[in-house]
Image: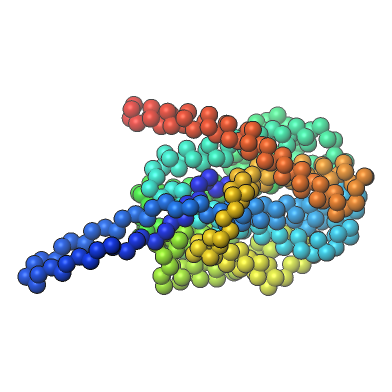
Amino acid sequence: MLLPPARSLPAVPPEPATATPVPAAPATAAPAPEAPAPAPGRGPRLRALDGLRLLAALGVMLFHYTGKDLDPRIWGARPRALMPEVSRISSYTWLGVELFFLISGFVICMSCWGKRPRDFLTSRVVRLYPAYWFAVLLTAAVVALAARPWGSYHELTYRLVLTNLTMFQWPMGTEAVDPIYWTLWIEMRFYVVFAVVLAFGLTYRRVVLFCMAWTLAAILAPGMHWGPLTELAQPQYAPFFVAGIVMYLMHRFGPNPLLWGMLGFSWLFAQNQMPGIIRQYEAEVRHPIPWTNATLVMTAGFLLVLAAALGRLDRLNWKWLTTAGALTYPLYLLHQEIGWIAIWVGHRWLAPLPLLCVVVTGVVLVSFLVNKLVERPLSRALKPLMQRSFAALSRHG
């Protein structure tokens, strides 16, 4: 999911040193109580994370277009036979999903700091639903009109489309209009789990304890064979979200041995979960994926987000990265089914590599237009409605 992060990605500068020395208290005076440290202020946008989100989305797109063992009718032949060099690389770019989860842990923790649960719910609704509603309806319309020769993995019905508009089709037992939406359910469960600590107010100590508790629950859940705990703890993906949260704590409060230890443990937990994740993708690429290669790519994702958290990527401050980050969510939602249909239509006239470039460029352009003409206006209209609704709840108890 990818999950779509919050719009504002503020970096947090260290607190300035005191300008004038404080005179020492007399020996007989009682020590003054320690004042709480002021909260760090807002800093410049972390545009490097916007760039990493775009990198993750493009990686997932490349995997779906050339890494998967697609029906040969889409390209006219198997992608691996048409573009072996590209396919060899893109068979690993599904790890963009795990990079999304790392970034999501970082950004959700950052965007929630100092906010109330109602603010969090409002931000998630106005950020997630407008582009998602449009993507569901557009994808359903394109799939219904295209009459693809390779068929569909489910029957497209009005009930299915309408249920998909809730974004809760999986717990309702309904398939998704586009299989790519599966990551949204992963993200939604992360929000539910994180809302527990948010309800008490985010502090450094509470977030650290939350990360420890979630990690422990994710480790123990499979052995306890209790479905609800496993569903919430999400053992396969919990270490990525937790690592992102820990990196945000490093960004906000500075690294220390405890946070380094938690981050290292999250990486160890994540590499242990890789075989189970790899098996899912081996069924899609139809060839073995070595654990070593996948773990090296995963580790590169950890290091990139960590570098952004510690300010090592601050020089990547180009304004266009903000736009790139904004179009990532609609790009993720729209690229798979619609992209396959575009490839199927275009492969009769274009060679594979030029066609790949045309389709990727086209999906990026459509995503930019969706963000500008659909997502932003609907979000602006929806936000005051949500705020008035919560105000009514407060007034009427």
Relative horizontal placement of residue 189, taking residue 153 as reference (left or right)? left
The quarter holding residue 25 reads: bottom left
Relative to the observer, which residue lies in front, 172 or 350?
Answer: 350
Residue 275 visible somewhere in the drawing: no
Quarter assignment of residue 59: bottom right
- Between 260 and 305, the one lying in front of the other is 305
Quadrant that contains the C terminus: top left
Count every numbered label the image shows and give the total. 0
Q: Residue furthest right?
A: 348
Kindly tell me whether residue 281 is visible in this rendering.
yes
Give me the residue at 69% from left, 32% from top.
137
> What residue is rendered at 51% in x and 51% in y?
45
Q: Is residue 82 above or below residue 21?
A: above
Vertical arrangement, residue 174 with respect to residue 292, above or below: above
Residue 13, picture quadrant: bottom left
Q: Position of residue 269 (x, y in %)?
A: 55, 68
Residue, x 60% and y 53% (percent of image)?
318
Place of residue 109 in the rendered image (x, y in percent of width and height, measured from the top left) = 46, 53
Q: In the rendered view, does 25 fall on the left or right side of 322?
A: left
Tell me, what colour scheme is on the image? rainbow
The residue closer to the viewer here, 193 or 130, is 130
Residue 72 located left or right of residue 239: right
Seen in the picture, residue 53 relative to 137 is either above or below; the reply is: below
Percent across and percent down for residue 324 are 63, 48
At horizontal 41% and vertical 32% (from top left) the residue drawn is 390
Left or right relative to 223: residue 338: right
Residue at the farthest left position: 28
Image coords of residue 128 (percent x, y): 57, 40
